[in-house]
Image (cartoon, helix red, strand yellow):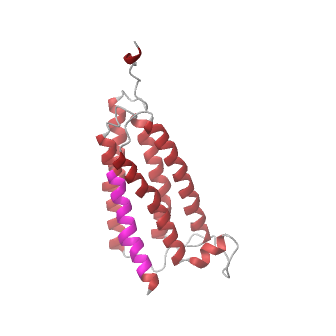
Amino acid sequence: MHADVTQNVLMYFVLPIWLAAGFADWLCHRASSIATTSGAKESVIHLLMFAQMGVPIVAAIALEINALVFAVMIVCFLLHEATALWDVAYAVERREVTPIEQHVHSFLEILPLMGLVLVAVLNWGQFLALFGLGTEAARFEIRLKDPPLPWTYIVSVLTAVLLFELLPYVEELVRGLRANGGRLVPMRKPDNSKR
């Protein structure tokens, strides 16, 4: 019973809010004229973070959760956090990162951790086994989830990811490249305030 509740919270609460936060972040980028301020380079960083979180999401949806999947999830999460720091450090030097965008970022950082924790709760034995703890032997094989998640759920999630994550961020990249003649970084305007 508790496992069903935990899985439903993960599938129908955490993941949808995470996707909504990603779309909200894209809206914040549009509002800050990302194409002409930080340019396509920041969009490439966003797509990198998308990939870093896409791998564990696809693994959680499609694969049996074992020590290997946990190792991949943890590495991807840590890479995502490091990339998020790089992203913000790059962005704040070139455009306004509003309090609303900062708040959206807090969701984008905590929700992957929350998702990882809930997956660990559902598969505690393999989570412990990854670190040589507990009574289960760590499993490192790639095996499809059995039984699989409902196909309607998988199609719905993949459609939402395509429409509200991938396409908007690709559009952001294209817009940035077009605005800057194909350059990743906009040309800096001379600072006339020092004259």
- 161, above or below 135, in the image: above
Question: At which x and y percent is residue 146?
Answer: 48, 79
> Residue at image x 44%, y 38%?
92
Looking at the image, residue 27 sits to the left or right of residue 121; the answer is left
> Residue at image x 36%, y 59%?
19
Magenta residues span: 5-24
Q: Is residue 12 rendered magenta in the image?
A: yes
Q: Is residue 3 rendered magenta in the image?
A: no
- 146, above or below 192, in the image: below
Looking at the image, residue 134 sits to the left or right of residue 45; the answer is right
Which image quadrant: the N terminus? bottom left
Looking at the image, residue 169 sits to the left or right of residue 127; the answer is left
Which image quadrant: the C terminus? top left
Q: Nearer the viewer, residue 80 or 109?
A: 109
Q: Nearer the viewer, residue 167 or 124?
A: 124
| Residue placed furthest toward the top | 195
Q: Magenta part mainly helix, strand or loop?
A: helix
Question: At which x and y percent is residue 52?
Answer: 50, 54
> Residue at image x 58%, y 73%?
66
- 176, above or below 168, in the image: above
Question: At which x and y percent is residue 148?
Answer: 44, 76
- Quarter of the image where one finds residue 74: bottom right
Q: Nearer the viewer, residue 184 or 92?
A: 92
